[in-house]
Amino acid sequence: MGLPFPVAEPSPKVHDQLVGAPPAHLLDHPFNRLGPWAPWVGLVILTLGHFLHSCAPKRTLLPIFVVLVVAYSGQLAGAALFHADVSAFFGALAMTPLVLWISDQSWGPPSMVTFLPAFWLLVPGAAGLIGVTEIVGTDSPLGPDDFTAAIGTVLMIALGILIGTAIYNSTRAGLRGVAMFKGSAGRHAI
């Protein structure tokens, strides 16, 4: 159903005068108007939302929040040290061993309880949807770039999860080997 009056897209020159920047600049350079504290409040809101949506037991609230903080911190560190394109790799790499460690503890929830919110934090949902929409609905030159970036980010997350799992499993196996060696050495010494 259309509007009762015609709506025209403003020309790029008019848009630049109204907004103060070209549309491509606005898409490529997000601006945080709330301040540096906003993402951390977002982590709390995401934790509570997942907790309430999943009807999770109360004991899972803190592990979910801690995993989200570690995933976001890893993403920030990856963006600061390397580039934003690979930051999801570092977020996944940081959170995966923690998720597996928490699930191995007697008090810890199953790994999917803490893994899924962190995965949803790292997945570039909005950018990927914008890219698909721009490819299908318009002739925007940014559509394929957004979609390619979303696919690349998902691949970076998968690689971070694989390497993080390998690190956790090899570390756990090494610690078990050390514990068995110490246990057998103690029995033979007596």
Image: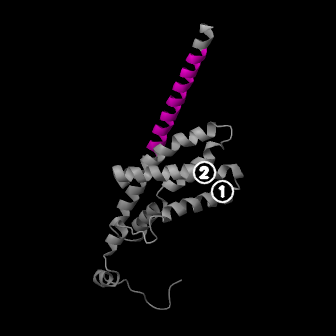
Distance from Cα at disc 1 to Cα at disc 2 = 8 Å
Question: Where on the picture, by quarter, is residue 185?
Answer: top right
Residue named by callout 1: 51
Amino acid at pointer 2? Ile
Amino acid at pointer 1? Phe
Instruction: Check the image and report above or below for 36 versus 64.
Output: below
Percent x, y for residue 9? 37, 83
Residue at horizontal 68%, vertical 41%?
A: 107
Percent x, y for residue 31? 39, 69
Q: Is residue 133 magenta?
A: no
Task: Describe the element under mark 1 as helix, strand or loop.
Answer: helix
Using the image, tell me which numbered label, if any, was put on residue 172: none
Front residue of 10/53: it is 53
Using the image, tell me which numbered label, if any, was put on residue 64: 2
Task: Describe the element under mark 2 as helix, strand or loop.
Answer: helix
The scheme the figure's colours follow is one colour
- Compared across the picture, whether 61 is left or right of 167 comes to right
Percent x, y for residue 8? 38, 86
Percent x, y for residue 7? 42, 87
Magenta residues (range): 158-183
